[in-house]
Image (tube, helix red, strand yellow):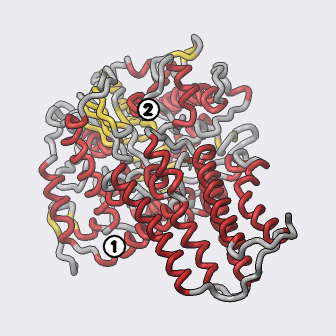
Amino acid sequence: MLNKKWPKHTLLAIAIIATWFKTYITYQTGFSITIDNVMQEAILFLSPLSLLLFLYGLSLFFKKQKNKNRYLLLMTLVTSIILYGNVAFYRFFSDFITLPVLFQTDNFGDLGSSAAATIYPTDLLYFSDFILLLAAVKFIKIQEDNKESRSSHRRAYFILSGAVLFLNLGLAEAERPQLLTRSFDREMLVKNLGMYNYHLYDIYVQSRSQAQRAFADGSELTDVHNYVRANQVEPSEEMFGIAEGKNLIVVTLESMQSFTINEQMNGQTITPFLNELTEDEDTVYFPNFYHQTGLGKTSDSEFLLENSLYPLSGGAVFFTHGGNTYNSMAEKLGNQGYATNVQHANNKSFWNRDMMYESLGIDEFLDIQSYSVGEGQAVNWGMKDIPFFEQSVAHMAEMPQPFYSRLITLTNHFPFTLDEEDKLIDEFDSNSGTLNRFFQTSRYLDEAVKELFDDLKEQGLYENSIIVMYGDHYGISENHNEAMAQYLGKEITPYESAQLQRVPFFVHIPGSGKGHVNEEIGGQVDMRPTILNLMGVESDTDMQFGSDLFSNERDEFAIFRDGRFVTDDYVYAGSTCYENGSGQPVEQELCVPFADQALTELNYSERVINGDLLRFYDEETGQLLDADQ
Ligand code: GP9
Ligand code: MN
């Protein structure tokens, strides 16, 4: 059979079909893409085709068969690398690659151990189309075609490929209106446009945002300014200035989620110390507090904390806009005479922190160089939290007061590994090792926080400080829903998934007697105004989207970075409007006004960042500056 001469475009057909089918199978196996109906499945199936027809079809412009073959081999290799790159990235981040993260090479170095753990020999299958084509080129005899295709044939071919693209876009528009204008969710883009078109779209969006800064001017800030002023609330009189002049210690609780607080796992308490704090007379605990991070994970949470702006829908703002003008909480406290710093036992370039902290006006960054990591003091990503806290508090003892010191923990990070002696509870018993270990590392982090409090007391810093703690983002992604369902004893619907985005938020003010459990619904964007008010620092002329969680005037609202949101009545998730509390789906209309507001707010925040618009704003006076200033 191999001696028979096959039609001249056989190799092109093999390449297209092989990559097409491989891509479709990868959608099903390499990612967890949710499909709700047959139409979505059909779009998913069709989506790789248009770009493949076009890209591979360019081989028709080559004259020599040898060059046609080489070109096709190169393209199957390139598309394989793109697809596999996404699969590997997805295993780690549960997200698709977007252009700016490719420039985050520093981070990929540090991810080494975790990334290696997610590469398998069977991954070679992601290159199966390339291998197949290689074999076909070698073994199949075709009627050699050493001339350019006839232009009329080519035209017909490319019209067909264009038609497939329009069919794809038409179906996508019907299924998901405004897909390209909203584009919060990369999964939706990949699902509807296909992986390869998605990347072209991403390249377009990213280069546009570069151009946006170049062309932005101060007038774009007017709408945002009006919106921010219109939504501003008065601070709580009772709490304003309650911590004035005290040191501010903010602790980032790596991957800590609220579902562990005041709960047990197989009869064992997960966070005994934090549980105690929820009942403590000097601690306010917010159980309905949500993370609002995107792809920038920890760094996005820092961005929300410092600026009360939302991070970006694509990429990590610490990287993409590390050089912008900001009006951070650190800078503000610095102006009040505070010494400001961040302490984190990791490389300073991770998440581009060294650059970004300069833009945020943070005086000092105590990175891994400031710590001595002794024998047995490192695990997983680096220094263990307990010695980290101990040495950080020793640093604090040397700092001029008052200070604002931010501590970023690390031990409770994927893949959640611990040394035997640090395992204070057993593993859980689900099919997800990740979730099973997560309980143990959460327990360790709880222990570390307890020791932090002791260290502060020992160094005499406790009484004169306020301690704010927040969970940065989820630790357990939706890939572990089955195991989570086993733990929670209920199915993980989109409603439940949204509720699982709750992270703990604690405000501990020694000697205040203000402790209570505060049910207010809020998110990380609200930390800056809340904290500044406690410190007695006015922020009413600042460009911030959050509001004081203690204020009686504020609306209960938490907007997720991907467009989901929670109000006291509703939860919007998975394109469905649910009643908050019962989790029952309700009429879509009920969520619409909030969805519009969420979209507006996220867009405004994005506009401020992309245009670097705060360079046109004077936060002292609340005035817009002329573009040429
Ligand atoms: C890295 C640490 C963890 O320095 O903040 O980052 P994450 O992966 O959680 O964003
Ligand atoms: Mn983190």
Q: Is residue 156 above or below residue 163?
A: below
Is label 2's Cβ within 8 Å of ligand 2?
no
**Closer to the camera in the image, 36 or 126:** 36
Q: Is residue 562 left or right of residue 74?
A: left
Q: Give the residue type that dot 2 points to.
A: Ser
Q: Is residue 302 above or below residue 50?
A: above
Q: Identify the residue position indicated by label 1 in the image.
A: 213
**Closer to the camera in the image, 340 or 17:** 17
Q: Identify the residue position indicated by label 2 in the image.
A: 497
The residue sitting at 30% across, 29% down in the picture is: 578
Nearer mark to the viewer, of 2 and 1: 2
Q: Quadrant of residue 507?
A: top left
Quote the CA–CA distance across marks 2 and 1: 35 Å
Rendered-image quadrant of the N terminus? bottom right
Residue 475, given in percent of the width and then of the height, sits at 53, 36
Rendered-image quadrant of the C terminus? bottom left
Crowding at mark 1 (Cα within 10 Å: few <14, some 14-19, many 20+): some
The residue sitting at 62% across, 84% down in the picture is: 149
Residue 76, given in percent of the width and then of the height, sits at 67, 67
The residue sitting at 32% across, 59% down in the picture is: 181
Q: Is residue 261 above or below residue 103?
A: above
Q: Is residue 82 left or right of residue 134?
A: left
Residue 317, given in percent of the width and then of the height, sits at 43, 59
Residue 325, given in percent of the width and then of the height, sits at 33, 66
For the residue labelled by badge 2, is the local secondary structure a helix, a strand or a loop?
A: helix
**Closer to the camera in the image, 66 or 216:** 66
Please say whether residue 445 is visible from this viewpoint. Answer: yes
The residue sitting at 33% across, 19% down in the picture is: 281
